[in-house]
Image (cartoon, rainbow, N blue to C red):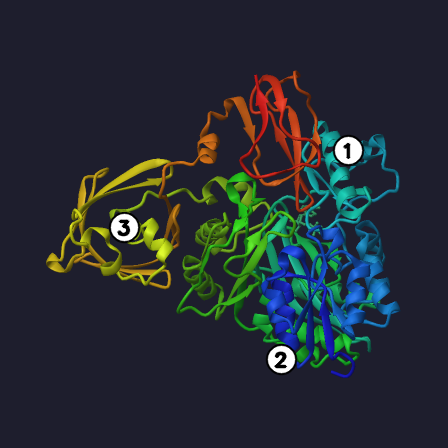
């Protein structure tokens, strides 16, 4: 590099780790920044040094431009990489970097500003002859004008925040009666996230696909495309699976898409990596949606098929160097698919979940790429994005890639958090996905069939749980000795009975075992499942969270986690959670009849309360709004009734499952 010797990464999580990796290969010194709870995060450990940027509020830490620039000065950085999200598309930040003499790894503040306001970007694209989704982009924002505009466009329509991103301030409206409420929520969300509540309206294109083109442009005016990505698999209008190349798009249409993307980049004198997003309809029409003036979350699929390092290219362009290849030297080979792993609950509208990562089980014996920012012991909080990692597989063709990804996902598990991993496994097994028949509403339409359902544990799994419970008694967990059953099986000690009763709890149902210790027939334990009346002989070895069990007739290898409350066994893509103890007070409270109370569906901050104590409400009435990661979630009344008390006030933080409202 000519100019870039020290790089500050103004981000966290997997993308900070990803950027550090390439910078290290290029012998660039890396500086990480962290909010308080990220002090021991992976990105801080991987960087050459790490500086505190502020407390755990986004505004005061990763969005704090002054603090970030002060750190950059202090550590004599020459360049700042914003990653994605956070300040990556903030023209003011790019401008201040330029002004204070730091190389901003991204486009000019001017190009960011041109694309940052979505309605203006659309306008610009229309003038550059790039087809756009029809809609209303007027300045007038009063209800009457917006209602007329929606009517003229024709329902369904989509409301979008002019300064939006990440699905915030976005609502699909199917009929006129839903419009007023949707406008209010979208405006509130938009104001909170982007400091502006201007909306624009688009025709909602049903069953379209999200196709985007990766482009690069250097300071010499060379523009290239790096092919397309299909990002149609989404929930809440946000991507969860992306792939390259896109299936079933005629080559001439692809060429038009590439050209439209190149035109868009040229129209704003773009610099660096950018993505032009289109909606592609079944009539083989494509429409410009927006341009992202940064590296995308899903850039790895492009890296896998082209064999290029996009962060390296970003740094080259930022360093003032020309793009290293010509268009005809860039090939796309094979097929790559990325799955995004989120701390979220598919059963609760994919709302973010929180918790502490107690164990990470990684796939073995499959070729995969894992871009991750997490490590065992990390607490996942409501303050930051719930994306934990990305699992990417590259294969000869789509079929091979799906097979590889299925193998990898079946072995990937995180203990301590609700994640979308079981949901992703189901999507990968879905016939429509396998045959490439997908569109942006696919998940929404097939949600019922894609949701993972709890499995009943087999006799083998029950026996393993019993074995683990025995070998990890409270005392043995305290001692934390080796897992030799000879040391730990209580009943083998002299003068103790050689029979034990074990009681566990699976999905709130008691499972009981009677265990006899025997050295006969190569079995350590003889387990009688009192619940199912089955008997099993079992010996096992445990090491590094893997249990190798021998049932005389067959063997079994599974991952497991154990502490004094929980036993979790992960086997063939399914996690079985057993509780070890009688319920705690908290759990008992959780189990109380919820008819008289309303529980928080997710962790978050109370952002709005519509009702008062004493008020009568009908089923479906709006009660409170919860906010997490700047997304607002409305909690509706589950029944007709009278509000007895509201336990929290606006601004209070609540945990998932706590009682928000009592009913009379
Ligand atoms: P954001 O920047 O907030 O992520 P986008 O404009 O990129 O929002 O849109 C996100 C997703 O919402 C798209 O990938 C697509 O699935 C859906 N979407 C956006 N606009 C439309 C539209 N006019 N019709 C149908 N779907 C749309």
| Apparent side of residue 373 relative to residue 164 in the rendered image (left or right) | left
Question: Residue drawn 77% across and 38% down?
Answer: 187
- Pointer 3 residue: 470
Q: Which one is in front in this view, the residue at disc 1 or the one at disc 2?
A: 2
The verdict on label 2 being within 8 Å of ligand 1 is no
The quadrant in which residue 522 appears is bottom left
Q: Can you say which quadrant of the picture contains the C terminus?
A: top right
In terms of image quadrants, where is residue 63? Answer: bottom right
Q: Please state if 538 lies on the left or on the right of 304 as rendered.
A: left
Q: Which residue does the numbered mark 2 point to in the structure image?
A: 25
Ranked by sequence position, the earlier of labels 1 and 2 is: 2
Q: Is mark 3 in CB contact (under 8 Å) with mark 2?
A: no
Measured along the vertical axis of the image, is residue 195 above or below residue 103? above
Q: Earlier in the sequence, mark 3 or mark 2?
A: 2
Which corner quadrant holds the N terminus? Answer: bottom right
Q: Position of residue 216 (x, y in %)?
A: 73, 71
- Name the element at disc 2: helix
* Pick the front one: 473 or 525: 473
């Amino acid at each position: 590099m000519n100019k870039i010797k020290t790089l500050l990464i103004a981000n966290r999580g997997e993308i900070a780790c990803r950027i550090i990796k390439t910078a290290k290969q290029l012998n660039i010194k890396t500086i990480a920044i962290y909010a308080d709870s990220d002090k021991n995060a992976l990105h801080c450990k991987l960087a050459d040094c790490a500086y505190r940027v502020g407390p755990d509020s986004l505004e005061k830490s990763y969005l704090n431009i002054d603090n970030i620039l002060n750190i950059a000065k202090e550590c004599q950085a020459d360049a700042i990489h914003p990653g994605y999200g956070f300040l990556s598309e903030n023209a003011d930040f790019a401008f201040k970097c330029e002004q204070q003499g730091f190389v901003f790894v991204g486009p000019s503040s001017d190009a960011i500003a041109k694309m940052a306001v979505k309605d203006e970007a659309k306008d610009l694209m229309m003038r550059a002859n790039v087809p756009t989704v029809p809609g209303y982009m007027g300045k007038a924002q009063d209800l009457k004008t917006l209602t007329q505009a929606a009517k003229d466009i024709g329902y369904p329509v989509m409301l979008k925040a002019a300064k939006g991103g990440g699905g915030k301030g976005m609502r699909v409206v199917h009929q006129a009666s839903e419009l007023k409420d949707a406008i209010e929520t979208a405006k509130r969300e938009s104001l909170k996230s982007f400091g502006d509540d201007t909306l624009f309206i688009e025709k909602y294109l049903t069953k379209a696909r999200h196709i985007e083109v990766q482009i690069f442009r250097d300071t010499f005016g060379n523009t290239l495309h790096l092919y397309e990505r299909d990002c149609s698999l989404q929930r809440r209008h946000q991507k969860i699976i992306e792939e390259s190349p896109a299936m079933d798009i005629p080559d001439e249409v692809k060429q038009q898409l590439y050209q439209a993307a190149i035109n868009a980049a040229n129209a704003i004198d773009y610099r660096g990596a950018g993505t032009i997003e289109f909606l592609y309809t079944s009539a083989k029409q494509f429409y410009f949606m927006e341009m992202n003036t940064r590296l995308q979350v899903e850039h790895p699929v492009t890296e896998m098929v082209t064999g290029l390092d996009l962060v390296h290219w970003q740094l080259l362009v930022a360093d003032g160097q020309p793009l290293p290849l010509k268009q005809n030297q860039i090939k796309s080979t094979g097929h790559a698919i990325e799955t995004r792993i989120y701390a979220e609950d598919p059963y609760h509208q994919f709302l973010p979940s929180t918790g502490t990562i107690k164990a990470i089980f990684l796939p073995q014996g499959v070729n995969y790429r894992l871009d991750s920012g997490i490590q065992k012991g990390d607490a996942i909080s409501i303050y930051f994005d719930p994306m934990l990692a990305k699992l990417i597989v590259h294969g000869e063709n789509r079929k091979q890639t799906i097979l590889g990804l299925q193998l990898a996902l079946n072995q990937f598990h995180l203990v301590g958090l609700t994640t979308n991993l079981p949901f992703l496994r189901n999507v990968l097994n879905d016939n429509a996905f396998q045959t490439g028949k997908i569109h942006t509403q696919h998940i929404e339409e097939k949600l019922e069939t894609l949701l993972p359902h709890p499995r009943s544990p087999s006799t083998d799994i029950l026996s393993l749980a019993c074995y683990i419970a025995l070998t990890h008694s409270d005392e043995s967990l305290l001692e934390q000795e080796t897992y030799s059953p000879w040391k730990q099986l209580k009943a083998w000690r002299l003068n103790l009975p050689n029979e034990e009763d074990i009681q566990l709890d699976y999905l709130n149902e008691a499972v009981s075992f009677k265990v006899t210790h025997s050295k006969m027939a190569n079995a350590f334990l003889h387990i009688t499942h009192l619940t199912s009346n089955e008997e099993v002989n079992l010996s096992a070895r445990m090491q590094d969270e893997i249990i190798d069990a021998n049932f005389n007739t067959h063997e079994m290898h599974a991952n497991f986690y154990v502490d004094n409350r929980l036993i979790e066994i992960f086997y063939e893509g399914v996690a079985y959670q057993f509780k070890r103890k009688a319920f705690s007070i908290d759990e008992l409270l959780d189990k109380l009849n919820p008819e008289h109370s309303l529980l928080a569906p997710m962790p978050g901050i109370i952002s709005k309360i519509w009702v008062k104590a004493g008020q009568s409400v009908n089923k479906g009435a709006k009660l409170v709004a919860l906010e997490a990661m700047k997304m607002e979630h409305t909690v509706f009344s589950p029944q007709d009734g009278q509000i007895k008390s509201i336990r929290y006030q606006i601004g209070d933080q609540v945990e998932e499952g706590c009682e928000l409202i009592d009913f009379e």
